[in-house]
Image (cartoon, rainbow, N blue to C red):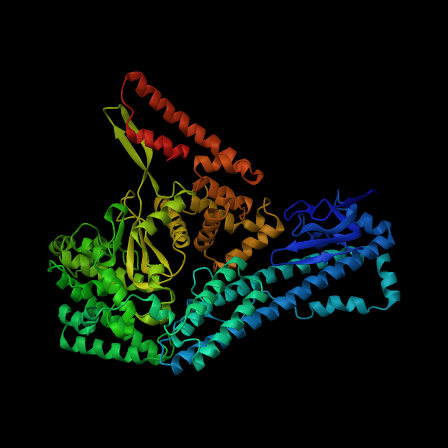
Amino acid sequence: MASKELNPGTVIVTSGQVLNAVHLITQGSVRASFPGGEIILKKGDIIGLCDIAYDSHFFTYTVVDTATLLSFPLKTANSLKEIISGNTEVSRMFYTSMINQVLAILVQYARLKESCSEIYRLSLEYYDKYINTCNSNGIISRSLPQFESFAPLSLEDDLEPWLLGYYASYREFPAEINQLLPGFPAYIIGALNRSSIDIHSAFSVMEDMNDYYTEKMSVFMQENGIDMFDMYTGLLYRLGPDSPDGTAVKENIDQIIEYIKTHPGIDTDLVYERVSAYRTKLQGLSTVTAEESETEEVSPQTVKELANSLDVILDYSGVNEETANSFRKCIMQYKKLSDKSSTEDNARALRAEISKLFYQVYAEAFVMSVRDKVVPTILKMFFNFGFVDEELAGIENANYLYNLAEHFTGDSKNGVYTAYEWFYNIYNVAKDPSRNEFDVDFLAYLHEQKVTAKISAEDEIRLANDPFERLKFELENMFPMVNKITFGRLSTFCPVFSEHNIIKPLKSCLVTVDSIVESIKKVKQIDYSAFYRETVYTNEKANIPKEFIGVEVLPDVILMPNIGTRGVMWQEIEGRKRTTPARLMISAFHLEDLPTTFVRLVGEFRWEMCKRIQGARWNDVSDRSLTSEYFDYVQFYRKNNELSAEAKEKVKQSLIKSKNSFKEMFVRDYITWVLYEGTGSPRLNKIARTIMSTYCPFPKELRTKMGANPMFKEIIDHYEVKTAQKLHHLDNVIQKLNYLGIPVPKEITEHRAYIEGTV
């Protein structure tokens, strides 16, 4: 059996490659890489042993030092037995190498578990220090969304605690036992397969731990700036670096930086950028704090205008004195809370009472505003941002909102509406009210009221076009629910604008018409057909009796009056007509990455729109559709012969993370499809990729580019065949029209471009 010498950097085997041989390292060293870690194999180790119980490699093996390999082909199911039985020394090397590799993996498993415990402890420790420093200096502390559900590591399928000791005990066997073991090939083969299975079990658990660790590392620093590092640096700028507490805060920041630099999980470029910006700003601080130098100067006139904002809002709304006094009292109590995100009963009850009163005042004030030609600026701040009090908001933030309110508008041509504009369109009968939380629309609600004899048939007809009834339905059903969901932290939600919710500069998280248009455009660059619906087209003049064509209907996007972290796909159509816009809701100040949020919303829209079209047969695979094929794929993945054991395990873990929701799992895969697969970075398995390629296809130019990749070629070729059939039909229609001298309708031309993927 010939040996082979390989130079440093040579990739011997890549992850996913078929396992058709194992290789003995007779010289040099090799790096075995796996998601979340690596081990080094040296002379006497066997490449491929860890996957011996499976049909493909999980590791990627790369030469570190010039290596010489001796290969053992695995041509049949009995190949391993023949190798082990034929040579006692080889049998011993196989067994010893496997034990060494298992122990190396289990040691990394133990270290990772300890790291997860450490990062949980440190996160809470630094967060408590931050809260205490804020409280002792009379500063309103900021909250982090990550702490909404912050919990220690919890593993559903952890490894047995005795496993590491079990494998480590091999090294303590007496020499005579080690000499005897290779003589029992059946035992060796069983041990190798058992060890391979244990290693893959460890990988599954380590994947969960890596996810946990990465998520908790983002508490310290992440790209969107909603993190501990930003909280601490913001606090330092307010205190001043030379103040007693400022010095302590600066020491904590230095400790956080050191921890981030010495532990993996955060992009090094991001760390360098954020730390450099912090140190530059720190050097520039003299007698003026960064907060003072960065905020716009608040003019005395604006301070005067903002004074007693709550009274202005309450007086304008015309609510009764009891409601007004209750709201004033609650806001005063809320302002005095040291921790406005507290989950204690008194704080929760106060937020609930404020929410109830807020929506009462909002509804009354809005009704007053529709009769006014000019709405006061303070009220615009209230309607579009949830602003009620200048002290609660912080005077600098109130100043920013005051200057913003006059020109904060949507754009109906692009389907973007501020909260006030949206409710006005509902009142003005330009838009129909949204469905309630039970998926019942306004007309269905009125019909139900008539059926239950709560209103008469005449009332049903009259109320259907009553502006105030339409507005009331929207304000009482959609608004409170969506406002809370878009905020993101359900248990600590309060609808009033408060400084403690401002985790990053308001300017940087303001959602504009341009940012929404750009976000939707980015999705369409990968999934160009996302908002196309099939409809029937007829044209007697052009001699076209009936043709099914795709028309694009872009969604309506409504900006909710809060500072939030989530988007909501509230409904996929209006009423029953399929060519009406979907309704996507998002915070006016969105703290997460806006384009990524829109990818998720479009994924949810894709799923719900398909269910709407398919009706009761949405999961019937005999009627092929996106939802039915995806449902079938997830439901029967265990029996799917096209999926490897590793792929099946990943599907299982993905389903667990999605809490057994097929829709959520699809949305996760859709995000992967747009953000990774669409940029040439394959992450999905073959089945999921085929479904996405069929129902969420790439545009023509991207298909051509991706077709060169072997992982996409077969799928794209199949799609192109189907596309060619559809184009052939359309070309016949167009050719017939040309022959008759009839101009080709633009609807047919546009539909052809849609089918081809060149729109």
Residue at image x 38%, y 65%?
A: 504
Quadrant containing the N terminus is top right
The picture places residue 583, in percent across and down from the top left corner, at: 30, 52
Q: Nearer the viewer, residue 315 or 250?
A: 250
Quarter location, residue 437: bottom left
Q: Nearer the viewer, residue 363 or 52?
A: 363
The picture places residue 266, in percent across and down from the top left corner, at: 53, 61
Q: Is residue 10 above or below residue 322?
A: above
Quadrant containing the C terminus is top left
The reply, left or right, for residue 688 in relation to residue 201 is left
Q: Residue 128, can we see it?
A: no
The reply, left or right, for residue 471 in relation to residue 674 is left
The reply, left or right, for residue 243 in relation to residue 259 is left
Number of numbered discs overlaid on the protein picture: 0
Q: Is residue 512 above or below residue 288?
A: above
The picture places residue 196, in percent across and down from the top left corner, at: 70, 57
Residue at image x 86%, y 49%?
A: 86
Q: Residue 112, can we see it?
A: yes
The reply, left or right, for residue 493 in relation to residue 273 is left
The picture places residue 541, in percent across and down from the top left corner, at: 23, 24
